[in-house]
Amino acid sequence: MQLIDTHVHLNFEAFQQDLAMVRSRWQEAGVVHLVHSCVEPSEFSSIQAIGQQIPELSFAVGLHPLDADKWSSQTADEIEAFARSDLRVVAIGEMGLDFYKADNYEHQVMVFESQLAIASALDLPVIIHCRDAASKVKEVLQKWQDQKRGRVRGVMHCWGGDPQETQWFLDLGFYISFSGTVTFKNAKNIQASAAMVSRDRLLVETDCPFLAPVPKRGERRNEPAYVRYVAEHVANLRGETLEAIAQQTTANACKLFGLKL
């Protein structure tokens, strides 16, 4: 059985002391590939350094919406140059909108659209962070597609929306990725969404070191091996086997990100 963790942050301090052991555990759990996301360009060198140690790692590069105030006239050039220079870059992100923790709405939208332009120019998928902003993210993506400003495809990562919102993004052609939140007892909307996503648009992730899934929720650090628990829970919600979910989500990740295992 093979699994792909489509969203990790291994360069964070939580993994500095024992990354080799963490890798051994994800290999034992059947995780064969990981997509390392980025929150700002200053991380590029640290992500590349980890990639030198871990061949099963691909990269996404971008600016997180909560870091949107760090955007400058050079940021777009930095992101595009890095994406062009390293064949391990398979996506732009994470990007998007977060109206839960910040209120610089217009600036976030500008930064979001600027990164959509980079992804379109490079023909790369996007990894979208969306928190308390589903209607606005939908509006931005719909406008982008209606104006035919370039192809855009990607994934709604660590998805927390209800089925209606989920359908919005499925209709726009996006994949939906579920994290440890889908295992939380009171996450009824997320669980309903996981049950209704079409098989060919389903992905799993950890978003580690955050959001450890049940039965590891009490641990302070999440890690890629725990994506197996996410996949198991999604399988249960959908009335499918773990093996079927692993096979489908791995195939979906390979298709979206152009991975070759």
Image (cartoon, helix red, strand yellow):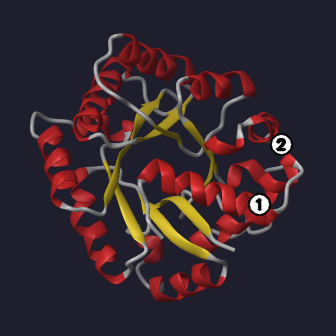
The answer to the question of whether label 1 and label 2 lie on touching residues, with beta carbons closer than 8 A, is no
Mark 2 residue element:
loop
Q: How many numbered marks have been drawn onto this rendered protein structure?
A: 2
Frontmost of labels 1 and 2 is 1
Mark 1 residue element:
helix
- Residue type, numbered disc 2: Asn
Mark 1 or mark 2, which has the lower sequence index?
2
- Does residue 99 sit above or below 241 in this rendering? above
State the image coordinates of residue 111 (x, y, percent, origin top left): 28, 29
Residue found 56% across the figure and 62% down from its top:
5
Label 2, on which residue?
Answer: 186
Q: Nearer the viewer, residue 153 or 14?
A: 153
State the image coordinates of residue 37 (x, y, percent, origin top left): 40, 55
Residue found 47% across the figure and 48% down from its top:
256
**The disc label shown at residue 244, or none:** 1
Q: CA distance from mark 1 to mark 2?
A: 26 Å
Residue 213 visible in the snapshot: no
Q: Nearer the viewer, residue 9 or 148?
A: 148
- Residue type, numbered disc 1: Ala
Residue found 61% across the figure and 21% down from its top:
168
Q: Quadrant of residue 57?
A: bottom left
Q: Is 97 on the left or on the right of 28, as rendered?
A: left
Q: Is 22 on the left or on the right of 19, as rendered?
A: right
Crowdedness of circle 1 by 10 Å Cα count: few (<14), some, many (20+)? some
State the image coordinates of residue 235 (x, y, percent, origin top left): 81, 55
Q: Is 175 on the left or on the right of 82, as rendered?
A: right
Residue 130 visible in the snapshot: yes
Q: Is 260 on the left or on the right of 227, as rendered?
A: left
State the image coordinates of residue 106 (x, y, percent, origin top left): 33, 17
Q: Nearer the viewer, residue 11 or 227?
A: 227
Picture quarter with the N terminus: bottom right
